[in-house]
């Protein structure tokens, strides 16, 4: 695979990430909240969190490709911005993984941990 092809895939990943993340937020809006075991048990929870993780994963790949394409012109401030973008997107990814894997188990075994205090 050539560098040019990799950059094109990164651009496609960023585009797909935007679409997938928009679908995630549409489903999240339909859920109405992220708080409480009844929300986690809703049938839309698992698909929305899968979109969350997929969108964030695609975004990380896309941002890396975007930086790889333009790193020579970005300088030190570009590197700082890139590091911040990757860190923030990885945080969004980790949040999705936790919501997808941990929250359903908590809703089943310890629903009081997901409620509002």
Image (cartoon, helix red, strand yellow):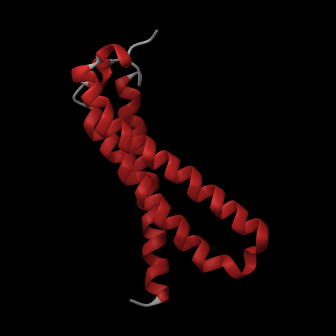
For residue 48, say whether it is visible: no
Residue 16: quadrant of the picture = bottom left
Which quadrant is home to the N terminus?
bottom left
Give the residue displayed 58% in from the left and 50% down from the top.
Answer: 88
Q: Position of residue 101 (x, y in %)?
A: 29, 39
Q: Position of residue 114 (x, y in %)?
A: 37, 19
Question: In the rendered view, would you say 1 is above or below 86?
Answer: below
Q: Position of residue 20 (x, y in %)?
A: 38, 50
Question: In the rendered view, would you say 20 is above or below 7?
Answer: above
Give the residue displayed 42% in from the left and 75% down from the top.
Answer: 9
So how many labels did they put on this image? 0
For residue 56, say whether it is visible: yes
Residue 82: quadrant of the picture = bottom right
Question: In the rendered view, would you say 23 is above or below 83?
Answer: above
Question: In the image shown, does 92 or 62 lie closer to the viewer?
Answer: 92
Question: In the rendered view, would you say 103 is above or below 2?
Answer: above
Task: Left or right? Give the position of 26 relative to 75.
Answer: left
Give the residue displayed 57% in from the left and 59% down from the top.
Answer: 86
| The residue positioned farthest toward the bottom in the image shown | 2
Task: Left or right? Give the position of 96 relative to 105.
Answer: right
Q: Position of residue 90 (x, y in %)?
A: 50, 53
| The residue positioned farthest toward the top in the image shown | 117
Give the residue displayed 46% in from the left and 78% down from the top.
Answer: 8
Task: Left or right? Give the position of 73 relative to 115.
Answer: right
């Amino acid at each position: 695979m050539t560098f040019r092809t990799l950059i094109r895939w990164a651009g496609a990943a960023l585009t797909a990430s935007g679409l997938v993340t928009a679908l995630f937020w549409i489903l999240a809006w339909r859920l109405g909240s992220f708080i409480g075991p009844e929300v986690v048990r809703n049938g839309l929870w698992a698909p929305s969190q899968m979109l969350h993780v997929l969108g964030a994963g695609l975004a990380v790949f896309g941002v890396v490709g975007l930086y790889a394409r333009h790193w020579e012109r970005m300088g030190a401030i570009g590197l700082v911005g890139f590091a911040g973008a990757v860190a923030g997107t990885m945080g969004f990814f980790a949040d999705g993984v936790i919501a997808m894997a941990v929250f359903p188990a908590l809703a089943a075994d310890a629903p009081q941990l997901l409620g509002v205090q």
